Amino acid sequence: MDLFNGFFIPLKEFFMVVIKYAPKFDQAVLLTLELSVFSIALGTIIGLIVTILKLTKFKGLQKIAYAYISIVRGTPLLLQLYFIFFGLPLIGLEFNAFISATIGLAFHSGAYISEIFRGAIISIDYGQEEAARALGMSKIEAFIHIILPQAFKRSIPSLGNQFIIAVKDSSLASVITITEITLTARQFSAATYNPFPILFIAGVYYYVIITILSKSLKALERRLQVDER
Amino acid sequence: MKDKLMIKVAGLHKYYDDLEVLKGIDLDVHEGEVISIIGASGSGKSTLLRCINFLETKNKGDIYVNGKKIRRSAGDINKLREKVGMVFQRFNLFPHKTVLQNVMVGPVVIKKAKKIEARNKALKLLESVGLEDKADVYPAMLSGGQQQRVAIARALAMNPNVLLFDEPTSALDPELVGEVLQVIDKLAKQGMTMLIVTHEMGFAREVSDRVVFLHEGKIEESGTPDDIFERPQSERLQAFIASIW
């Protein structure tokens, strides 16, 4: 009797809450996915641009790139999001919450992604550029056709890591009013006074999203590995 | 036949900081001529070759191709490199491209050649180096000798006037050296102008019209293979020949 009351009844209750509330996360999951996809895509573009700035021979552009990276890496993401959403409007730059969050997350991961790209590019054997240049390619042609494809392939494992971090970082958007998975979980917890099953649901959603992401990255890595020895 | 001046190197100096690696090199290369450059390691052989192709910059002296002086502008240098092909010691094939793509990429990217034409030409070149059956595999699947033959085909795809070989067989297992030398020999017979930095003395003697002996950044002696190998004049060349035979 004790076992029944102490274990099975709460277990049943747990699953009742899970079954009832899991579907109510649909909008939240969608928002988390949108935030992740947009910030990863934009962050990758920013990362590539910043990498190219760093590799140019113009000192001014290099300085801008390094200042950007050092600011992003030197301050917390949470503070950056607050700054964009609450701080920038005071100087007339106002975006809605979703745009603020996307910009903030993209700027953040862009800095890390640019470092990943730079590492991959300088790891390519110098003989590759020499061979391309010796054929008569310009620096830019050699970069686009020879260096970048190899560097991109080499950066996939670290890039995948960064993408996973970006999905999890999207939970911080909850502090600037975006009802993605984490904020939704908080709201349902408050409404039901039963945080355990609600947070469990949120965890499962994140886990599934990230597992799918990391499996697809592994598949991409394998596909591109045809030419490795 | 061999009267048209293809490459002229005049007063070439090359420094690495304070170290003077090349100390005033003058060299004329005529059309159809095959010149081997020999010498101990550190004598500046590879550096000379790389200077001709401007892979080494910040040097003093002038390079002329077909009578035209090459200025140190990106445009001039890229044009020069289209006419002067290079084959490297470590092959430097592009690992993310198939053998066929490696040979096609120069004409397609640089000369904006039509893909289909570049492809046909690449297949012909691969056939001429005996690798037409490897067109669709990646370089990592090939032996060193096969990779070097692809690298030669890649350089030929740009229709160069001159080919530079930087120790083309030094990174190969001994049993693979022959197949690469055969390809170079065939090119020599077809009248290709070539400058070859090599340690293969037997081959240098066979294939060359002229052999240049470099010592401490200077041309110590040059002449026909027989002059160099049978009747070496300078003591250093005599010592060098004695050390390798």
Image: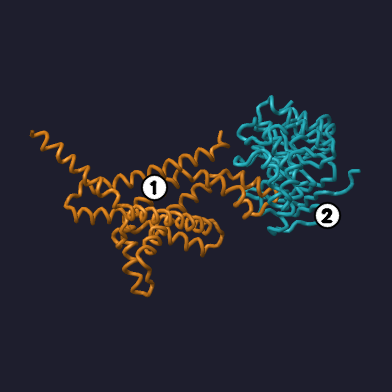
Q: Looking at this rendering, what residue extends furthest in the right direction?
A: B1
| Element marked by disc 1 | helix
Q: CA distance from mark 1 to mark 2?
A: 59 Å
Q: What is chain A's hue in the picture?
A: orange
The residue carrying mark 2 is B67
- Tell me, yes or no, whether dots 1 and 2 are on the same chain: no
Q: What is chain B's hue in the picture?
A: cyan
Taking the image as shown, residue B193 lies to the left or right of residue A207, namely right
Q: Identify the residue shown where x is 71% and y is 28%.
A: B177
| Element marked by disc 2 | loop
CA neighbours of label 1 inside 10 A, class few (<14), some (14 to 19), many (20+): some
Q: Position of residue B44 (x, y in %)?
A: 69, 42
Q: Looking at this rendering, what residue extends furthest in the left direction?
A: A1
* Identity, as a three-letter code, of the amino acid under mark 2: Gly
Task: Say which of marks 1 and 2 sits in front.
Answer: 1
Which chain is mark 2 on? B
Q: Position of residue A161 (x, y in %)?
A: 41, 46
Q: Position of residue B2 (x, y in %)?
A: 89, 44
Asked whether disc 1 touches disc 2, contact meaning CB atoms under 8 Å apart, the reply is no
Q: Position of residue B1 (x, y in %)?
A: 91, 43
Task: Look at the picture and state if A82 lies above or below A37.
Answer: below
Residue A43 seen in this snapshot: yes
Q: Nearer the viewer, residue B119 or B228?
A: B119
Q: Identify the residue shown where x is 62% and y is 49%.
A: A145
Residue B239 seen in this snapshot: no
Residue B147 image-quadrant placement: top right
Q: Quadrant of the C terminus of chain B?
A: top right
Which chain is mark 1 on? A
Q: Nearer the viewer, residue B89 or A138?
A: A138
Q: Identify the residue shown where x is 82% and y is 30%.
A: B206
* Identity, as a three-letter code, of the amino acid under mark 1: Ile
The residue carrying mark 1 is A164
